[in-house]
Image (tube, helix red, strand yellow):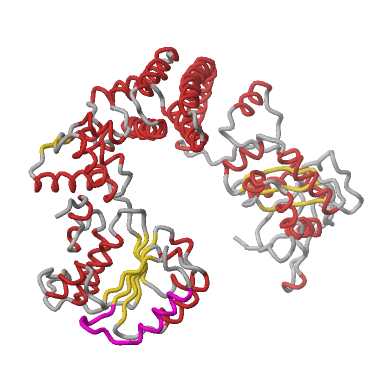
Amino acid sequence: MSYQALYRVWRPQRFDEIVGQQVITRTLKNAIITKQISHAYLFTGPRGTGKTSAAKIFAKAVNCHHAKDGEPCNQCETCKAITAGRLNDVIEIDAASNNGVEEIRDIRDKVKYAPTQADYKVYIIDEVHMLSTGAFNALLKTLEEPPANVIFILATTEPHKIPLTIISRVQRFDFRRISAQDAFDRMKYILDQKKVTYEEKALWVIANAAEGGMRDALSILDQVLSFSDNHVKLDDALLVTGSVAKKLLKDYFLQVTKPDSAAALKGLSGLLASGKDGQRFIEDLISFIRDVLLYQESPSLVHVESTGLSDEDFQQLSAAASAPVLYDMIDVLNETQDEMRFTTHPDVYLEVLTVKLCQVSKDLAHSASELGPAKAKIDQLNSQVAQLQQEVAQLQKRGSTSPIVSSQPASPHIRKRSAGHPGTSRVNLHQVYQVLETATRTDLDEVKSLWSDLLSMLSNMERGLVELATPAAAGPDSVVLSFKQPFLLQRANGGNLSEVIQQDLQQLCGKDRRVTFVPADKWPQIRADFLKEHGYSIKKPDQRVQPTAKAPAPSREPQSGQDSTGTNAEPKQAAAPAPTSPADQPTDPVVSKAEELFGSDIVKVENN
C-alpha cells in the first residue's frame, strides 16, 4: 500500500479527536443526542482547523444507528462507507471547481429525492465562498425550504464573502486557530503511537511554525520525519521550517538593544548564509519580542519551556529593553514585513531593518536621558499637589463650614500658588456681586435658551467641562455659571474657557457678557451674603422687613425711593401697621430682589 500523509492517516474520526474545538464539538454532540438537528450549518475558520473533518463526523453521527453520546461507532457499514467516501447519501462538493449555477441547480433537483441507504442525505460544500452570485441565488431557495431528510454543511475560510441571506439561514460555527500547546500534544501523541523518537523542542518549533493549523503541523512533521530518517531533531526542524534558533534570536535581540549595529549585521549575515528565510526570520522575531513583552507584564503569561529559553534568559531580555522600545521595534518589523512581500532582495531589507532597530533603541535611550530633569520637576510638582490636597483634607476634617471664598484680593504669593496648583476653587465675589446687582430673570432666561446652541459651538474638551454647568444668574453684560463638580471648576478656571464662552455668547445674542464661574454648593450662600450685604434682612413673620443701616454698594447709586438693589423700599422711619390679610401684607424686599434676580416661579418663602 502506498504511503499516506500523516494528516490523512490521523484524520479525526470522532468528535473527541478534533483538536482545540471543544465548544463546537460539544454543541454538535448535544444536538445529535437531543435530536435538535438543524437543516443547514456553516463551518468557518482558518485552514487546517477541522472544518471538513467535523462535517464528515457529523454526517456519520446523524446516520449511525449505534451512536453513543453523539459519537459515531465507526464500526457499522454506514460509518465505514462514509469514512471511505462510498456512501451515495453523503455528497462532498468542492465549490472551487463546481461554482456555477448549473451545478447548484443539479443539487436543487436531486435534493427532493429521499436518501437510498442512510437516514439523512448530507451535502458537504467545501470552500462555499467560491460560488458565483447566481449559484448562491439558486442555493438560497433550497436552504430556505429544504426537505426534512436533507442536511447542508457549508465550509469556508472566508465567511465575509458569503451573502447575508445565506448566513441568516444556517447555524454558524467559528473554528478557532489551534494553539501551539494543542498542536504539540497531538504531535506527541501521534509519534508515541508510531513509536518514533523525538526532541520536544523540535515539536515546539513545528507547532509555532504551523501558525494555528493542525494539518500544517502534521505536514511539517511529515517533512521532518523524511529529512531526519524517522527521528525528530531540533536542528532538522529548524532547517525544514526555516526558523531561527532561540539562541540566535536572543543574541540578535541583545545586539540591537545594546545597540551594537556592527555585531547585529554580522549575526544577520550568518543567518542568511545558513539559508534562513527572511519572512520567517521577521515572524520569529515578532513572536520573540511578544514573549519578552508578556514576561515583563507577568512571567506566568509565558510558557517558558515552549520557547527553548530559561527564566534567567528572559530576565536578561526583559532588562535589556523597556516596553516603549519593544512597541517601536514591533512597528518597524511589521512595516518591513509588508515591504518584503514582493521583493527579490530580502537581504537588503533585513540589513536596513537591523539598522532601524538599533536606531530605535538609541533614540529612546537619548530621549530618556533628556526627560530626566523634566521627570524630576514633574515629581516635585506632584509632591506639592499631594501636600496641598492633604492640607485641604485636614481643614475639612476640622469641620470648617465657611466657604472658601473671598471678596478681598489675594496676596501675590497666594495667587501664584493657586494658579500653579489647582487644589482649591477660589471665587471672585466682587465680580459675582457686580453680576447680581444688574441681574434679571429676563437675561437669565435668554442665556438658558441659548445654552444648547452655545454647547454645540464648543470643542469636545470645552464641552466636557461645561456640560454639567448651568447658568445661575445673568445681567445685560454678565453671566454667572454654576459648576456642580469642583474638579471641573478647577479645570475651567485654569484656562481661557471664560473668554471662549464670552465670544460664543456674543455671536449668539449680540451682547458682550463677562463670564464668571462659581461652585454650585457655595452659590446659595453667595446669594444670601449678597442680599445681606446690600441692606436686606429677614425679620420675624409678624414684623415688616426693613433695610439695614448698611450703606449701599458704591458701584450703584440708588434713586429716590429705592434701595441699593433697585428694589422699592419703605423709608426706615415709617411704622408698619399690622397687615389684616395675606393680600395686604407688604412685599418683603428680600423676596422682591430674589424674584427680580431668579424669577418668582422658583422662589419659595418659608417662615421660620
Q: Residue placed at 85% from the left, 46% from the top?
A: 512
| Residue interval drawn in magenta | 101-121
Give residue 176's position: percent from left, percent from top. Answer: 33, 54
Whether residue 188 is situated above or below residue 117 in the rendered picture: above
Answer left or right for 605 relative to 557. Answer: left
Q: Quadrant of the N terminus?
A: bottom left
Whether residue 231 is situated above or below residue 47 in the rendered picture: above
Extreme residue in the right direction = 560
Q: Residue 539: name its quadrant.
A: bottom right
Q: Residue 58: name its quadrant.
A: bottom left
Q: Is residue 313 visible?
A: yes
Front residue of 538/307: it is 307
Q: Residue placed at 47% from the left, 29% from the top?
A: 346
Give residue 183's position: percent from left, percent from top. Answer: 23, 46
Give residue 605's position: percent from left, percent from top. Answer: 66, 63
Whether residue 46 is situated above or below residue 74 in the rendered picture: above
Residue 143 on the magenta segment: no
Front residue of 449/105: it is 105
Answer left or right for 38 relative to 304. Answer: right
Answer left or right for 324 relative to 93. Answer: right
Residue 120 on the magenta segment: yes
Whether residue 145 is situated above or below residue 345 in the rendered picture: below
Q: How many marks?
A: 0
Front residue of 594/265: it is 265
Front residue of 518/251: it is 251
Give residue 335's position: percent from left, percent from top. Answer: 51, 34
Q: Is residue 383 visible?
A: no
